[in-house]
Amino acid sequence: MIARPSFGRNRKLHDQIADANESILANMAEGFEQSSDAVLASYLYTSKGSVAEVMVRLKGAERRGWVTPAEYSQCASQGEEIQRMLGGWIRYLRRCDFKDRGRFKDD
């Protein structure tokens, strides 16, 4: 969606959505490389926040007419599902609280 010409007219919004979207997976990957479940959970909270940022910015794009209500609704549903999954993963990590995740990595 952000490749559309309408987003090209507002490069800042395009870049904000692209950066927040990239941040979701980047923080998950970075967190997974950390040594404890608590630290991974912290990175997942950041990923969850990035999902929220993408959704807020897409809502703004919908208000401007750059995204249809149906497209926004589909993205919002997917965003809510991703946030639920991240929340479940965070709750699991908080319960487990494994302290030395790195010890079991294959190098």
Image: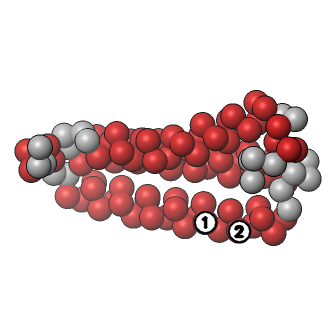
The residue most toward the right is: 65
Where residue 39 sits: x, y (%)? Answer: 28, 40
| Residue 62 appears in view | yes
> What's the coloring here?
secondary structure
* Left or right: 79 as drawn, with respect to 38: right
Quadrant (top left/top right/bottom left/bottom right) for the C terminus: top left
Instruction: Write the residue at 69% across / 34% down.
Output: 15
Circles 2 and 1, Cβ within 8 Å, touching? The answer is yes
Q: Secondary structure at mark 1?
A: helix
- 26 or 50, which is in the foreground? 26
Q: Amino acid at mark 1?
A: Gln
Q: Which residue is mark 1?
A: 78
Q: Residue 54 shows which numbered tag?
A: none
When asked about the image quadrant of residue 67, the answer is: bottom right
Q: CA distance from mark 2 to mark 1?
A: 6 Å
Where residue 38 sits: x, y (%)? Answer: 26, 44
Q: Secondary structure at mark 2?
A: helix
- 87 or 1, which is in the foreground? 1
* Left or right: 105 as drawn, with respect to 63: left
When asked about the image quadrant of residue 87, the answer is: bottom left
Q: Residue 74 shows which numbered tag?
A: 2
Q: Amino acid at mark 2?
A: Gln
